[in-house]
Amino acid sequence: MGAQLLDGAAVARAIRAEVAGEVEEYRRRRGSAPKLVAVLVGDDPASTVYVRNKVAACGEVGLRSEEVRFPATVPQEVLLDRIGALNADPDVDGILVQLPLPKGLERIPVLLAIDPQKDVDGLHPANSGRLLMNLPAPVPCTPAGVIELLDRYRIPIRGRRAVIVGRSEIVGKPLAVLLLQRDATVTICHSKTDDLPGVTRQADILVAAIGRPAFIRAEHIRPGAAVVDVGINRVDDAGLAASYLGKDSPRLRLMRERGFVLIGDVHPVEGMAQAGHLSPVPGGVGPLTIACLLRNTLRVARARREGAAR
Ligand code: NAP
């Protein structure tokens, strides 16, 4: 028996349809739709695709958007000046800076430079502080997507043991806060955790946000657990890909055409065999991250222009 797949793409479509309806209503009320500006520094292929997908998704739900590009060699002050100009531009509702930044640029000053009222990724300390205090704030998109996925599949959170592997500011830490707010008993693991399989096997809900392909194996998963795989890892070695996907997987053909395949942090075959629910990669958390970004853009626009709760 295999795990039930948590179809993030389907949940994302539902959220996008909801957002599209609300954007249309906003546009009728105010004359124009909210506008998101995505800042891309450098030409990292994955970041370029993420930004392109985010801008395209805006168009699909009726949001206005703009991509601002800088070379990887841009001086930090130039980047900060541009963010300052976007903060001051009344036509801009949401600003995101695609992470990671190229070497030589510091992430924290860039995140601090974004007006918290326009911070659609919810990464400014003013917003992460509000999240910690349970006050309305834009919630980081990937953790928000994980909660949406659990909720829409009616996977109970309250009272359950949730284990998150990964403690990044973007995923692990804010997700721990969200799960705690929903009355889960939360454990965060990281690279220094002793006996990782012993800890993760206690999880009713296991979230992997590590950045290592197929790292979570059968030994890490309690049989029947709900497993959410946040990882997105490009694997371009055909032998490795076959070891993760099985040598007969149709995805190997795609790999030969494209030169790489996306593998999550959970071993796809062992995860399917051991978990009760599993989010696939691709098609799991990734589409939800974008759907939650669209919703955040609408929410920050309403909050800033109309005083609605974020
Ligand atoms: P990150 O900042 O690199 O953090 C990785 C975390 O994993 C760190 O806390 C690290 O521990 C932990 N870790 C690394 N090796 C480990 C090990 N052997 N055992 C236990 N923990 C270990 O990564 P991130 O930005 O959170 O991203 C994680 C993954 O999610 C990546 O694949 C990324 O591409 C993906 N992602 C996907 C989306 C989406 O939309 N689906 C969004 C964001 C990120 P230490 O803190 O001790 O170093």
Image (cartoon, grey):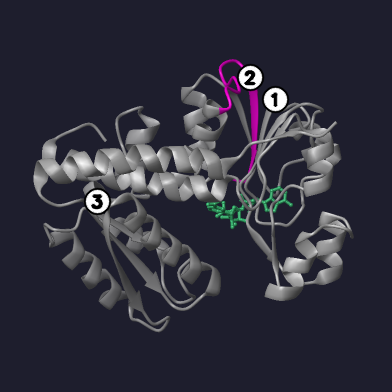
- Residue 160: x and y in percent read 63, 19
The amino acid type found where label 2 is placed reads Arg
| Disc 1 from disc 2: Cα separation | 6 Å
Q: Secondary structure at mark 3?
A: helix
The amino acid type found where label 3 is placed reads Lys
Q: What residue do we see at 49% from left, 68% from top? A: 49
- Earlier-in-chain disc, 1 versus 2: 2
Q: What residue do we see at 78% from left, 26% from top? A: 224
Magenta range is: 153-167
| Disc 3 from disc 2: Cα separation | 34 Å
163 inside magenta stretch: yes
- The image shows residue 43, relative to residue 122, as above or below, that is below
- Earlier-in-chain disc, 1 versus 3: 3
- Residue 127: x and y in percent read 32, 42
- Residue 52: x and y in percent read 43, 67
Give the prevailing secondary structure in the magenta stretch. loop
190 inside magenta stretch: no
| Position of residue 55 in the picture relative to residue 234 (left or right) | left
- Residue 22: x and y in percent read 26, 38
- The image shows residue 273, relative to residue 253, as above or below, that is above
Q: How many marks?
A: 3
Q: What residue do we see at 39% from left, 32% from top? A: 132
